[in-house]
Amino acid sequence: MQTQAIICEYNPFHNGHAYQIQAGKKAAGSTHTLALMSGSVVQRGTFAVADKWLRARTALLSGADLVCELPFCYAAQSAEYFAAGAVKILNATGVCDTLCFGSEAGDLEALSHVAQSLAFETPAFRDALKAALGQGLAFPKARELAFKATEGEKSASYLREPNNILGIEYLKALLRTHSTIRPVTIKRQGNAYHDTNAQSRFASATAIRQLLAAPGVSALALAPLLPYDPSLLLSYMQKARIPWEESYAKALLNQIHSQDLSRFRTLPYMEKGLEFKLKKALEADSRYDSIVDTLTSKRAPKSRIRRILMDLSMGFESADLSRFADPGFVPCLRVLGFNEKGRALLKAIREQDGLPVITNTRANITRLSPDQRACFDFDARATDLFSLFCEKQYHYHRDYTQNPVIIAEKEAL
């Protein structure tokens, strides 16, 4: 058994994701694929386009063998926490031979050089970073400029593209944990990450989400973009999905109105003065995008603001982030779905005894440590909020009642 791991969001799963699975298998000779996927909330700090079990199903129908949940405490955070948390879990499974990730560069040697330099920073880089941050720049831009000053333009250019950035963070995490997992990168195909053009066979998830939100979108329009029956997503959008922005914005404004400044200071990614600006969001209209725009600045980009707002909704504080980011903490492995090959992977993971595996929450939850239970509770809360704001019928504590998706071999590609 040769297992490739993929850290993902599948928001939604599309042709580019299917290509990555197959290309990664070919590059490394892998026989099994473990996908560690964001749950109800994704990294940009918003709710996923569909529930995590449907997204797991589409992945299993398209080449994945086992889909597990990347906990909220990592999934909805900045790239460094996202990557470090995911790699920590993959290390603990004891079964992953390779970590396959997409990148705009497609050059593992170049990305590894950048990762090595960032994982073990030089005094010159730290001084340059401090100077750039002192200019009021957001951290990603400040880091890029500091890297350019110390490593040159070519190396710094790899810090400008989203998939490169995440890939570099994966490589950093592998280095820092002395992982035995071997990295493999696949060059991103088709449209760019933020491209809204849905004409290419390899359209971005951004473009597909926009298409799904359009009134009257047809299966005919979606079929060239997805490796599975588009009616799976369309049926969900029509029967279960509702626009979440309006109701979520009202809930956010209510929280901002009712909380004092000291509460805001406990949130991750806050900095001096931003807590006062949060109160100014009450002057915005009741649209989610308007709230985000009101709080966005050169120092605090939209992605950071969305995460702060989501952390406020979730009751997730800096102390929680520190606790779960501790190298000594490993959460449980929450199983969202599997096929027969995935079942064999689960058996191998259980035999390693590196972390508790959760398939039946009610039966397995008592096996968790207090910190693992606290981590899981945030995932359950995220799903409750997803159901409350995004779905037509509210399912309370679905994490305790929903069984993993099981796909028979004949159903998959």
Image: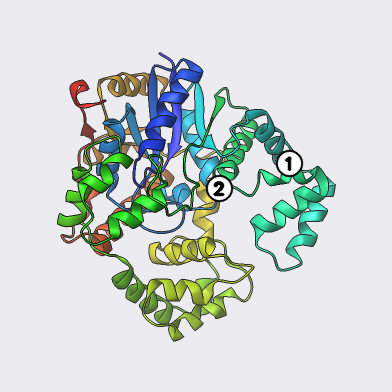
Q: Of label 2 and label 1, which has the lower sequence position? A: 1
Q: Is residue 94 visible?
A: no
Q: Which part of the image, by quadrant, shows the N terminus?
A: top left
Q: What residue is pinned by disc 2?
A: 162
Q: Secondary structure at mark 1?
A: helix
User: In this view of the protein, which residue sits in the foreground, 375 or 398?
Assistant: 398
User: In this view of the protein, which residue sits in the foreground, 181 or 19?
Assistant: 19
User: In this view of the protein, which residue sits in the foreground, 305 or 26?
Assistant: 26
**127 left or right, relative to 292:** right
Q: Which part of the image, by quadrant, shows the C terminus?
A: top left
**258 left or right, relative to 341:** right
Applied colour scheme: rainbow
Q: What residue is pinned by disc 1?
A: 155
Q: Secondary structure at mark 2?
A: helix
Residue 249, how many percent across, how many down?
A: 36, 73
Amino acid on which the number 1 mark rests in the picture:
Ser
Residue at image location 33% in from the left, 41% down from the top: 225
Q: Residues within 10 Å of mark 2 (few under 14, many from 20)?
A: some
Q: Is residue 236 visible?
A: yes
Residue 120, how many percent across, how many down?
A: 74, 39
Residue at image location 51% in from the left, 23% down from the top: 98
Which mark identifies residue 108? none
Q: Residues within 10 Å of mark 1 (few under 14, many from 20)?
A: some
Residue at image location 27% in from the left, 46% down from the top: 222
Amino acid on which the number 2 mark rests in the picture:
Pro
Residue 191, how many percent across, how many down?
A: 47, 45
Residue at image location 56% in from the left, 43% down from the top: 166
271 vs 117: above or below: below
Residue 278, how many percent across, how many down?
A: 51, 77
Q: Of all residues shown, which one is farthest toward the bottom?
A: 283
